[in-house]
Structure formats: C-alpha cells, structure tokens
Amino acid sequence: MTAALLQSTIRSLPLLAKGKVRDNYAVGDDRLLMIATDRLSAFDVVMGEPIPGKGALLTQMALFWFDRLTGIVPNHLTGDDPESVVSPGEREQVKGRAMLVKRLKPLPVEAVVRGYLAGSGWSEYQVSRSVCGVPLPAGLKNASRLPQPIFTPATKAEMGDHDENISFDRMVEIIGADLATRVRDVSIRLYTAAAEIALAKGIIIADTKFEFGLDTDGTLTLMDEVLTPDSSRFWPVEGYDAAFAAGRNPPSYDKQFVRDWLEQARVNGQPWNKQAPAPSLPDDVVANTAAKYREALQRLTA
C-alpha cells in the first residue's frame, strides 16, 4: 500500500479550497482537480490521523456509483485523466484518488435522503416524531426502516462548524421552490436506485447525502462524492436484524466505528466536546476503519 496522504502538495495548479477530506485545484476556468486525501472527519472535526488508502477507496466507490446512476441526472465527471493535468512528480498524489470534474456553482444545501431512522434523525424523532419537518409514524425504533425514503436537507457547514438540519420549506427559501423540488425528487430517485443495487450486494444504505451544482447553462448536476462511507450509513444485512431487535446501531461499513470510539473518548478525564482538536485515534481504530472501507468497496463491486 502506498503511503497515506494527509495533505496534498500540488504546486503546478492553483489551490482553490481544502475541505474536510478533499483538496480542490483549479484547472483552467472550467475544471477542477478533486483529490481525495486520507483525512477523516467525524462530528465535523478532521482527525489528526489519516486512514491509509481511504481516498483511493472513496474515489473508486464514487466512480462506481456515478457509472451505475447514469441517466437519472448529469454528473460532474469530464472523463479526462486526472494525472494529465499535473507535473510528472505530482502524479503519485493524484493516481487512483482524484477526479477531474466540471467547475460548477454549488448549491448551498446538502440533499440528505433517509431510508432508515438513525443518527440525528433518530434523536430528532424521539423529541418530535418527525425529522426535518417530515412527520413520521409513532412507534418507530432506532434503525427502523421508514415507510418510504424521506428527504431531509441540511445547510453546508464551514470547516469546523456543524451541518444544520433544515426543513424543506427553509430549503425553498434558500434556493427557490423549483430548484428545491427538483433536487428533492432527483435525490430520492438516486437513493432508491442505489439502495436497490446495494441491497442485492448485501448492504443496506440507511441514509446518504448528495451535493449538486449548476453548470453554465443552469443544468442541475450531481457533484462531489456520491454514496461513499463518508457520506452515507452502510449496514451489512446480516447484522441488521439482531441489532434492530436490541435497539442498537447496526454494525456499519462507514465511519460510525470512529464516531462510537469518539463518544467514549476522554480528554483530560472529560468526554471529548466534539471541538477541534480531536483526540488521537488509536492504531486499532485506524486499522479497523480502513478495513471497513475496503470491505464495503469489495462487497459492492464483487
């Protein structure tokens, strides 16, 4: 395995932004080089330790889904080789972990679709019997399958801040009714198609988030990562029933392993306050997280 990449250092292109995981570089005026590093964020805080191989796995999985979901909505891929736009000495940072994509105007909302009740959705449901303003039946439990997938948008957070769940009405106020409706409908179609594909491979997609932008013609375009363990909750089918019956979170292929460790971590004898800096991840947590990402990709693409 190649060395882990915590930070990219591309000098031949202008750096536009460093996100929680991806480093974006300008390629002319109309394209971006998106490099998926091995950084990992949890609770919107970037961990100090990389997950070796994670960026390449995320990229391979995103490309898998872009290919399978062609026809539902245009995506940002250009089809060009990412290694072709950097200097020879920089290709190792790009190889297998980057996408060369169209430069879009990003929508300032995240399109979250939930097929199961988990995470912040479960917390909200216990208080209001709804999630992001969507009413749900009484009597649901942690990890319950929902009667049908629901659209529960969120605002995008700046680095170090937390994403905020919002109602569809609030999303309409931010981007307009027509665009909000198109994003909602397309997101549910994407989730439904992907959930069916994944289930045939033994994986439940409990929830996921999509990101969209507009091209120069105003075409709604799927962008960024898609249906990866960083942006989704993946559960193996064989662990679901027992966990659900016991009221536990099912075992997962995503970064829930890290979240669960962080929930019990102590800093100076106190629970971590979910603010940077994060506690140092033990070697076994790093190794197990990397193994989960590998297993998810292998299972999906087998």
Image (cartoon, helix red, strand yellow):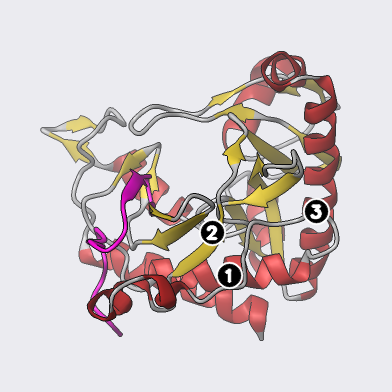
Kindly give the residue lying farthest to the left in the view shown: 268
In front of the other: 77 or 243: 77
Q: Quadrant of residue 141?
A: top right
Question: Which amino acid type is shown beneath numbered disc 1?
Answer: Met
Residue at point 56% right, 73% down? 80
Q: What's under tag 3, amino acid-wise?
A: Val
Percent coordinates x, y for residue 202 in the rendering: 72, 72
Kind of residue sitting beneath label 2: Pro
Q: Tell me the residue that label 3 is attached to.
A: 73
Residue 201 part of the magenta-drawn span: no
Q: Which residue is mark 2?
A: 229
Q: Which numbered dot is residue 61?
A: 1
Q: Which of the two discs, 1 and 3, sits closer to the camera?
A: 3
Residue ID at (67%, 17%): 174
Q: Please say if the residues under marks 2 and 1 sit with CB atoms less than 8 Å apart.
A: yes
Label of residue 300 in the image? none
Task: Give the magenta-colored segment's residue range.
Answer: 1-23
Coordinates of residue 218 in the picture (x, y in percent):
74, 38
Residue 43 pos. (x, y %): 40, 37
